Image (cartoon, grey):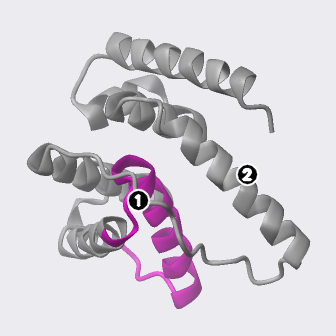
Amino acid sequence: MPVPDDEALETHARRMFRLIYGIVRNVPDAQDLTQDSLLKALRRKGQLKDSRKVAQWLNRIAVNTALDFMRRKGRVGFDQLVTIPAAKTESPEHGAIRSETRRWLNRGLKRLTQRERTALLLRDVEQFPAGEVAKMMGCSPATVRSHIANARVKFKRYEKENPR
């Protein structure tokens, strides 16, 4: 695996953090798991066959690390995301809108089970194919589709009850 420059590494780490946070819903745990994921990637860099798929490979490591953590802990923490790193060129108005939207989304995501939330984030946000999501979650593609369908129904209900 070619060594990414600092900016590329920061981009990968931020994406991995967002993905992991979406699963564990706890900032300190997501930070620790992001570091663990990056260390695993460095130790296993020989496993990467296609250097054009670094992001996908890192995402898979991040998801598996988060899911393993959730299985070991058997818990879901719903701590609020207190500080969100702002974009480098963001107006205060845009930052406030983004924070408000993030709080609204987080409240909606709390209504989903861990598996529904994970499947939805991997499929709709990270845009992994259902088969790939199934491998990451250790279940069948049909189960993934079921989790996603249930999550979408619950989220649409939340959206109807809580318009932005």
Magenta segment, prevailing SS (helix, strand or loop): helix
Is residue 32 something one can see in this rendering? yes
Residue 17 vertical position relative to residue 49 in the rendered view, above or below: below
Q: Which residue is mark 2?
A: 101
Q: How far across and how far down the image is residue 64, in percent?
A: 25, 49
Question: Which comes sooner in the sequence, label 1 or label 2?
Answer: 1
Mark 2 residue element: helix
Q: How far across and how far down the image is residue 36, in percent?
A: 24, 71
Is residue 127 something one can see in this rendering? no
Q: Disc number at residue 79?
A: 1
Observer-nearest of 59 and 120: 120
Highlighted magenta segment, given as a residue range: 1-28
Q: Is residue 62 left or right of residue 150?
A: left
Taking the magenta stretch, the answer to whether it contains residue 18 is yes
Observer-nearest of 155 and 120: 155
Image quadrant containing the N terminus: bottom left
Q: Residue furthest left?
A: 72
- Write down the quadrant of residue 124 in the picture: top right
Q: How far across and how far down the image is residue 55, in percent?
A: 48, 59
Taking the magenta stretch, the answer to whether it contains residue 77 is no
Image quadrant containing the C terminus: top right
Q: Is residue 87 left or right of residue 53?
A: right
Q: Amino acid at mark 1?
A: Asp
Residue 35 vertical position relative to residue 57 in the rendered view, above or below: below
